[in-house]
Image (cartoon, rainbow, N blue to C red):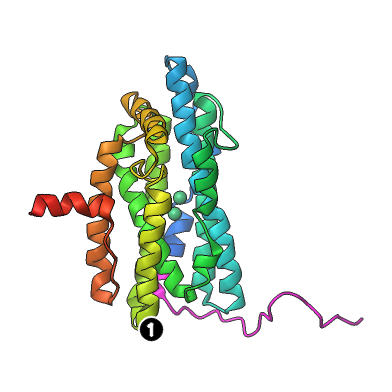
């Protein structure tokens, strides 16, 4: 029998099984112990049975559809990183962690669309045009490829930590057990995603060039302002009409305890997040440029 030696897959050898990052291996073990399933572990019937006005169900479904789209973007991002990890012969625990990451983002997506479905209907595409444009730019491979592999993963952890900070008040806002559980379990997974980035940064910040550190700061701020503050994390950078619509959806969802945050609270939370991110990365030689939407207020308070 003969085997073709012409294959498109990367050469897998040597397949290393030693552990380079024990803390990442620990995260992998935790991921196994803390795995959950939206279908098996969450009962969404409390939302179906709830006495909610139709406009509240509509707003809640739009809000949770947005949450589902965001989580879905992370799946594509993770798939690209997994390909890179395999091709560049990363240690086993890095490949394992990224695989877990993909699986976890998938269940975040599922938990979110199941809430939207139980409330009303999951929106397979955004109904408002600005969202049609914004969500696809959330993950841009051209940006990712500008950075060394591990530096890019560390950058992603910055966004994960902001997203995690927003989840805390949303969990507190949730009056329904199903939503509260989904928020809490997503938050628990996200904490591991942030940890992963922090561990890699601790090991590798010294190997990232000054230029790449500058790029990371700039890419972070650009994505934050152009994408995440335009209707994803917050509505602050949307044009007035769109901001009014998106803000209203969040207000209604928050008022009825559907696991949402109010626009004015989001800005405050993100301001705190940005401060913590700076404190975390600046000692490693990174500089996060000014974010006028968040820094201006803080400067006014300090003045
Ligand atoms: Fe997620
Ligand atoms: Fe995540």
Depth order, front residue of 156/172: 156
Q: Magenta span has 301?
A: no
Q: Which residue is mark 1?
A: 207
Q: Residue at x 37, y 55 (%)?
A: 224
The picture places residue 67, in percent across and down from the top left corner, at: 46, 41
Q: Nearer the viewer, residue 195 or 66?
A: 66
Residue at position x 45%, y 62% in the image = 29
Residue 156 is left or right of residue 86, and the answer is left
Please state, as top left, top right, bottom left or bottom right, where the C terminus lies in the image.
bottom left
The relative height of residue 190 versus residue 213 in the rendered view (above or below) is above
Left/right of residue 9 with respect to residue 23 in the rendered view:
right
Residue most toward the right? 1
Q: Nearer the viewer, residue 173 or 149?
A: 149
Residue 252 % position (x, y): 36, 25
> Which residue sits at x=37%, y=28%?
248
Outermost residue toward the front in this view: 240
Q: Quadrant of residue 209?
A: bottom left
At 30% from the left edge and 32% from the top edge, which residue is drawn? 173
Picture quarter containing residue 155?
Answer: bottom left
Residue range in magenta is: 1-25
């Amino acid at each position: 029998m003969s085997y073709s030696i012409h294959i498109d897959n990367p050469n897998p050898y040597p397949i290393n099984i030693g552990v380079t990052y024990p803390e990442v291996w620990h995260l992998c073990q935790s991921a196994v112990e803390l795995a959950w399933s939206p279908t098996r572990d969450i009962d969404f019937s409390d939302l179906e049975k709830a006495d909610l006005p139709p406009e509240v169900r509509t707003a809640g479904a739009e809000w949770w559809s947005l949450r589902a789209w965001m989580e879905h973007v992370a799946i594509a991002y993770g798939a690209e990183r997994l390909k890179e990890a395999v091709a560049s012969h990363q240690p086993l625990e890095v490949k394992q962690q990224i695989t877990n990451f993909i699986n976890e983002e998938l269940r975040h997506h599922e938990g979110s669309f199941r809430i939207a479905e139980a409330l009303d209907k999951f929106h397979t595409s955004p109904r408002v045009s600005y969202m049609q444009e914004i969500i696809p730019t959330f993950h841009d491979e051209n940006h990712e490829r500008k950075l060394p592999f591990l530096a890019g993963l560390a950058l992603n952890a910055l966004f994960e930590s902001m997203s995690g900070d927003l989840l805390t008040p949303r969990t507190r806002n949730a009056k329904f057990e199903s939503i509260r559980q989904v928020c809490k379990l997503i938050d628990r997974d996200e904490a591991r995603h942030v940890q992963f980035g922090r561990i890699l940064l601790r090991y590798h910040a010294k190997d990232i060039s000054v230029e790449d550190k500058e790029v990371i700061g700039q890419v972070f701020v650009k994505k934050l302002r152009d994408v995440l503050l335009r209707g994803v994390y917050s509505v602050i950078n949307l044009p007035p009409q769109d901001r009014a619509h998106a803000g209203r959806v969040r207000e209604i969802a928050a008022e009825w305890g559907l696991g949402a945050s109010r626009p004015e609270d989001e800005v405050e939370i993100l301001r705190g997040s940005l401060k913590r991110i700076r404190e975390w990365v600046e000692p490693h030689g990174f500089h996060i440029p000014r974010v006028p939407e968040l820094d201006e207020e803080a400067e006014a308070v300090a003045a």
